[in-house]
Image (cartoon, rainbow, N blue to C red):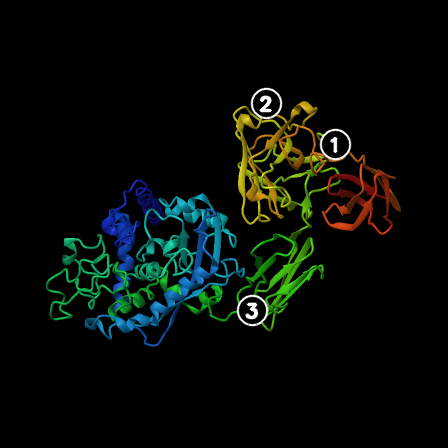
Amino acid sequence: MKITYVLLTFSILLFSSVSAQKHRVFDSSNARDGESVEYCHQHVKMKELYKDPNFIALNAVSEAEFQEKLKEPSPKGVIYKIPVVFHILHNEGAENISDEQIYDAISLLNRDFRKQNPDTASVHADFQDMPSDIEIEFVLATKSPNGQCFKGITRTSSVLSVQGDDGSSQVNAIVSGNDVYNGTWAGNKYLNIFVCGDIGGAAGYTFNPGGWNATSMTNGIWLLHSYTGSIGTSSVGTSRTLTHEVGHWLNLSHTWGGDNNPNQASSCSQDDQVQDTPLCKGVTSCNMNSNGCDGDNSYWGFDIRDNVENYMDYSYCSKMYTEGQKTRMRAALQVQNTGRKNLWQTSNLNATGATGVMVLCKAQFDANRTTICSGDVVQLTDDSYNAVSTWDWTITPATGWAFSNATDNSSQDPSIIFTQGGLYTISLSASDGSSTDVETKSNYIRVLPVSASLPYWEGFEIYTTLQNLTNWEVINLNDNSEFTIESGFGYSGNKCARLPNFGQQGSNIDELVSQSIDVSGVSETSDITLSFRYAYRKRTSSDYELLKVFVSKDCGESWSQKKTLGGSQLGSEASNSSWYPSSVADWKTVHVTNINESFYTPNFRMRFRFEGEGGNNFYLDDINLYEGGPSDDLVLGLYENHQEIGMSLYPNPTESELSIDFNLKSNEKIQIEIVDVLGKTIRSLNVNANEGDNSVFIDTQSFAKGAYRVHMNGKTVSSSLPFVKL
């Protein structure tokens, strides 16, 4: 019980010391020249721990075992392998680095520890032949604590990524929220590396090994994402941070000692406990002439320059570990009390999947875009793990697309050009030669139908659902209630789009995004207007929810915000029950008039974004895009001289034939399209219509039962009506 009390007391101290840094001012003396983050906080955190008598007592046990191991010869030629897991803690920002950046980071770590970095050949003449192969390798684990296969990387979305003053809170967020295994990843089984958007103002930190945290997940390393690897958000100049921190994790101090910043006068009276590294003050740049301390240790027998190229200094030109540092690090891996010895045991390598024998355990893939316009290219990327030798891609339906750039269905990362609107299912069968796994994503690629024309109107009358449409895309970022069809009422008809916002917890974002609309025929000197109607109530008077309207000129590649309604501007009345509009007075009409000529393109799109905070329901109807100024009435004609054609459909519903009747004031070529609920054109025909009454008969016997819409467009006319096939 006494030991348990001591460990608990120390655990509280361990991360209260981190919290104490919350208001810590940037210390430029602890940063490399020209950088705005302190390079390493290991000595800062260890110095805080040494203020606690309980820690000192516990750590003394580990240090005594370590000193005994230092006396034992390290077996030459024996490679110790360490299972590694990178935990990416991100807030949907740049810190959510790619897998490739992680692979680069561990590759550089292994390169440095095995002395395979080419720059060892250019170390200063005073240290030639001293760079050492540490004979330690780091292997991405492929099994989580519950035995689940994964790629050695977890991802957790949390605002704590950028609130780095409390490392324990960041670890707790990963434990409860990562995408692989929700539980503790023991520090005596994995080297846990936490990559974040902020870690308290440092580029990296860890703790020297000790029995006080042997099994804890906090027995790991924290890295700033921009100091992880050499690609992506990082760079070559910031790529050795992990090598530096692993040195600490294996019981190395900075070359100038263990408890202060570099370039301090007191450093010359301290030692890093490594015989073949000269006494020094430490540098923050690549100062090859640095010799800050007189009378270096007896190993040299004479005063010698500082080993600024050592990984445990702060220079920009670190290239090496010495043989003495190798001895300490390999001895650290022999200490049972700290958990380090268990890491490289065969049983643990098998349990964590770090044996180096790679097999396929999951087929997985992504696409660079999932909603596109006809004629666009989608790049598919294989993300299967952990070993794949062959790939077999299947796209359904089998028509309306083709492989591009000479790729085919057996390529690892094929690119596909889609030429026909619709929803496409993608399937990948991956194999390692002996086992196969398949991932299928149904209706994964949405290819928008041929651009609609002006005037464009959507009243949602022909739909029974908004799911799996090609002309409307529902985005539900919080995976809860989403935009759906309300079939009991609307403003100008019997239906509208409804967001069941009442009862949703916390912050929610829901979007409804249109198909592409051809606006390219509008003169640059003319105006276009986007009008729509909505109904909304707050839940309480203090609610502040937002409706944002965006438009795109490039099929959704980029978006421009054109309208924002929030708080009482969105709706001033409140209802504490699930509300719905009961009269036209409950609806408001909005006109968006700031869409300039740069958006007059063939692939114009609209996005309606509702940002909820647990308020009440939201309803949307009569989305109308047209040429000219604002109109409170629906605009269905193309020009100011548009004709009222009195289009009617008979019989409606129909079983076998549909008559489309309309009247023209003059002869005109008319295009008629029959569109299903997915927005797909079922039939299209051109009619040379005459002045006066016209009738066009459509054979509907081959149509599936359901709802459809007739679109009629000409130079001076435009109209649209729904019908039902029985």
The disc, 1 or 2, on the residue closer to the chain's N-terminal end is 1
The disc, 2 or 3, on the residue closer to the chain's N-terminal end is 3
Asked if one can make out residue 613 in the rendered structure from this viewpoint, the answer is: no
Location of the C terminus (image quadrant): top right
| Residue lying at the far front of the rendered structure | 666
Instruction: Determine which residue is flagged by label 2.
Output: 573
Q: Give the Cα distance between marks 3 and 1.
A: 54 Å
How many marks can you see?
A: 3
Secondary element type, mark 2: loop
Q: Mark 1: give few (<14), some (14-19) or many (20+) Cα within 10 Å.
A: some
> x, y (%) of residue 118?
33, 72
Camera-side mark, 3 or 1: 1
State if disc 3 and disc 2 touch (CB < 8 Å).
Answer: no
Residue type (three-letter) at the residue carrying disc 2: Glu
Asked if one can make out residue 243 in the rendered structure from this viewpoint, the answer is: yes
Q: Up-down: is 696 above or below 587?
A: below
